[in-house]
Image: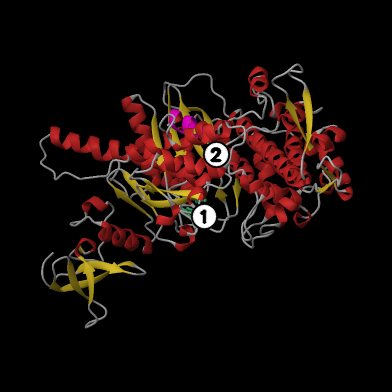
Amino acid sequence: MEDGKPVWAPHPVDGFQLGTIVDIGADTLTIEPLNQKGRTFLASMSQVFPAEEDVNKHMEDNCSLMYLNEATLLNNVRLRYNKDHIYTYVANILIAVNPYYDIHKLYGLDAIKTYQGKSLGTLPPHVYAIADKAYRDMKVLKMSQSIIVSGESGAGKTENTKFVLRYLTTTYGSGQDIDERIVEANPLLEAFGNAKTVRNNNSSRFGKFVEIHFNEKNAVVGGFVSHYLLEKSRICMQSNDERNYHIFYRLCAGASEDIKKRLHLDSPDSFRHLKAGALKDPLLDDMGDFNRMCVAMKKIGLDDTEKLDLFRVVAGVLHLGNIDFEETGSSSGGCILKTQSGQTLEYCADLLALDPGDLRVSLTTRIMLTTAGGAKGTVIKVPLKVEQANNARDALAKAVYSRLFDHVVKRVNQCFPFETSSNFIGVLDIAGFEYFEHNSFEQFCINYCNEKLQQFFNERILKEEQELYQREGLGVNEVHYVDNQDCIDLVEAKLVGVLDILDEENRLPQPSDQHFALAVHSKHKDHFRLTVPRKSKLTIHRNLRDDEGFIIRHFAGAVCYETIRFVEKNNDALHMSLESLMSESKDRFVRELFENSIPNKDSKQKAGKLGFISVGNKFKVRVFVKV
Ligand SMILES: Nc1ncnc2c1ncn2[C@@H]1O[C@H](COP(=O)(O)OP(=O)(O)OP(=O)(O)O)[C@@H](O)[C@H]1O
């Protein structure tokens, strides 16, 4: 940095501001802002960066900047964004800024044609250029390729994923309607897996990996979607200004009178699972979206019966949520259904083809199998308290809806079948690093996933590239980066990793979130990456006790996780009575949703308690085996 030349110095709102250095201290610099002469301030040396000669000139590739640092990168991206150039490269990585409006001709057919077969960098940065590079690499290297799309909620991940899919299927499709089906599958997935949140009114509440498969001639032959960690808590609870999954409101708004009658549907404010959140959003047109969704369903080959099956289960989940319980007042201490819930129970039983009596019993009692003594294997019905029955009702609603979502994904996959394929291009659309005021199990899994992606990035971009520079004797200065293996081990190591500690807790006769949090602290007392909430910089977290949470120092920052409900959220198993109730539904569609879900009978009898299916470990295996 030279005297008198502009530099970028920290700014509380804009990130950085231009100024000149007027004095140099031991570790600080005195800066005079260019637009506020005479109002100097001190800035730490490590936060002041050299600015480009011409701060108004932008580059298509950040690597072409004379000085590449955080401030010049941000300025370059901002200059370009202001001119509607939302894409910028950093070598072969693409940065995209969400414009929140349709930029004229940016994605049309002409643009698709322009990018076909063109090397990266020969045309303005574009998501199509990345898609084409993946295709050409697949063809030349004869190897499957993957594109990772990452960013915070609302950044534009899903939209860009869709552009990649559209580009590949339009450009390298086989001309059959399979190409169209791959694109048309999105509205269906979004109807069941997206919701309005405070950050995005069409937020994907699940991660997905979409594979486009190609034959030996490198033409599209089919596709396959894998999904990860649908946010189940949303089914029974939303914050004031958020909503449940789109399908619930669309069905209430758009179904014909006949269907509404058959499904006993009313307005959203008559359902407990909807009325806690925002019922409407001025930017969402539930009725129009319902009609568009039906068109998409038809295009991907769903007939009226299949459509009605989906709607029936959605309605069943809504009615289930309206069932209320009250204490019996008897010495058994159990509960019964409130009288006014009788009709709702009938509706629910009708829609899910269950025996109303069995549903009533399954919601208010829990079946236990004895494991010892003379009466080994005897069935005992344990009455549930009101709170336990509420939990059982909600657990059932979540289980039914998430099985339905699994089914939707499975059904979508049947729309673009392929027998064999030579290679695929995969697009991973998964939430970026998350840090809210309250962070729970979902944030924990997402941030663990991002920690793994960061490691992949470190290895692939920083380590391997630098090794290449060294081999070729380029004499490029070494770029230092923080190895995050210790953080990954903290989460996934066998037995002592947080995921295994949590599984261990779930297997205890009386698992508790508090015991789990304490076990995490005791197993990692002096771990650099882990500490207790009272060490947080934020008061809100400092108020948590040691048995209520932990802080993990991630690559992107420290996050305080509140461990309340970690144990519950980590268990995908339903109480045995509810599980068997569903798998004995008189309706084939409902029955099949619960097929293969009953854990091995012997293991259950051995355990003599509720089966356990680990959500955390399922997530760990599924995300990283695929990518
Ligand atoms: N390239 C784009 N052009 C125009 N609008 C866009 C573009 N990218 C995103 N948007 C707008 O921003 C909204 C949010 O984008 P998107 O749903 O892709 O975000 P996301 O990163 O996938 O968020 P989440 O993680 O919450 O699912 C879109 O519904 C769309 O209205």
Residue type, mark 1 in image: His
- Quadrant of the image for the C terminus? top left
Residue at which label 1 appears: 438
Dot 2 falls on a residue whose secondary structure is loop
Give residue 417's mark: none
Q: Which residue sits at x=73%, y=46%?
A: 387
Q: Is residue 2 left or right of residue 622?
A: left
- Whole-percent x and y of residue 381? 79, 30
- Quadrant of the image for the N terminus? bottom left
Q: How is the image coloured?
A: secondary structure
Whether residue 622 appears in magenta in the rendering, the answer is yes
361 or 155: nearer the viewer: 361
257 or 495: nearer the viewer: 495
> Marks 2 and 1, how far apart in space?
19 Å
Q: Around disc 2, counting alpha carbons within 10 Å, would you say few (fewer than 14), some (14 to 19), or many (20 or more)?
A: some
Residue at which label 2 appears: 229
145 or 396: nearer the viewer: 396
Quadrant in the rendering for residue 200? bottom right
Q: Which residue sits at x=52%, y=50%?
A: 548
Looking at the rendering, the stretch of residues picked out in magenta corresponds to 619-625
Dot 1 falls on a residue whose secondary structure is loop
Q: Nearer the viewer, mark 2 or mark 1?
A: 1
